[in-house]
Image (tube, rainbow, N blue to C red):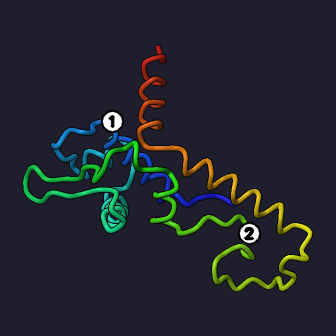
Amino acid sequence: MKFGVGVDYCLKALIMLAERYPNVQPQRVEEIAAAQGIPENYLRRLLIELKRGGLVASQKGPSGGYLLARNPAKITMADVVEIIEGDFAPVECLEEGGNSPCHRGDSCAMRNVWCEVRDSVNSILRRTTLQALAERRKSAIHFQI
């Protein structure tokens, strides 16, 4: 039960963009990839998904690149997970339209616990914004000596 590397890469790139917000100068993909240690071609594909999801905007041309499409205080980790991986479900039987081999449904002794796990994780993801993550990173950098 873990999120894929795509979610991690997206969050790293988005935090970098959040640190620059509301700067209207877009960040080049090459710069983001190099700074965050992300394979450039993979990051390009992820940014296209984030653009489709309305989290980033792009500008073409020699000074083009990506920037946040809205305030980082309005973008949550849950938004990123939803765009990249879909709804979070810790077990297959909780997935929407899942092909779970379990047919016990509500009589399953573990179902309520798994629902609590899902709801708790989703709650944390929904309340954690890019702005909060950028502030955490900034304060962590300032305290390293």
What type is the residue that disc 1 sits on? Glu
Q: Secondary structure at mark 2?
A: loop
Q: Horizontal and vertical percent for residue 87?
A: 58, 68
Rendered position, 3 above or below 15: below
Image quadrant assignment for residue 21: top left
Q: Horizontal and vertical percent for residue 99?
A: 70, 86
Q: Horizontal and vertical percent for residue 8?
A: 49, 52
Image quadrant assignment for residue 93: bottom right
Q: Which part of the image, by quadrant, shows the N terminus?
A: bottom right
Q: Position of 81 compared to 16: left or right? A: right
Rendered position, 145 above or below 76: above
Residue 52 tag number: none
What type is the residue that disc 2 sits on? Val
Q: Measuring 41% from the left and 38% from the top, which residue is drawn there?
A: 131
Q: Measuring 52% from the left and 67% from the top, which residue is drawn there?
A: 85
Mark 1 packing: few (<14 Cα in 10 Å), some, or many (20+)?
some
Q: Position of 22 compared to 130: left or right? A: left
Q: Position of 13 compared to 110: left or right? A: left
> What residue sits right under mark 1 in the picture?
19
Q: Residue furthest top?
A: 145
Q: Secondary structure at mark 1?
A: helix
Q: Measuring 48% from the left and 16% from the top, which residue is drawn there?
A: 143
Which of the two residues, 108 or 15, is positioned nearer the viewer here? 108
- Asked if the residues shown at circle 1 and circle 2 are in contact, with their CB atoms under 8 angstroms apart, the answer is no
> What residue sits right under mark 2 in the picture?
91
Rendered position, 102 above or below 127: below
Mark 2 packing: few (<14 Cα in 10 Å), some, or many (20+)?
some
Disc with the residue nearer the chain's start (1 vs 2): 1
Total labels: the figure holds: 2
Q: CA distance from mark 1 to mark 2?
A: 35 Å
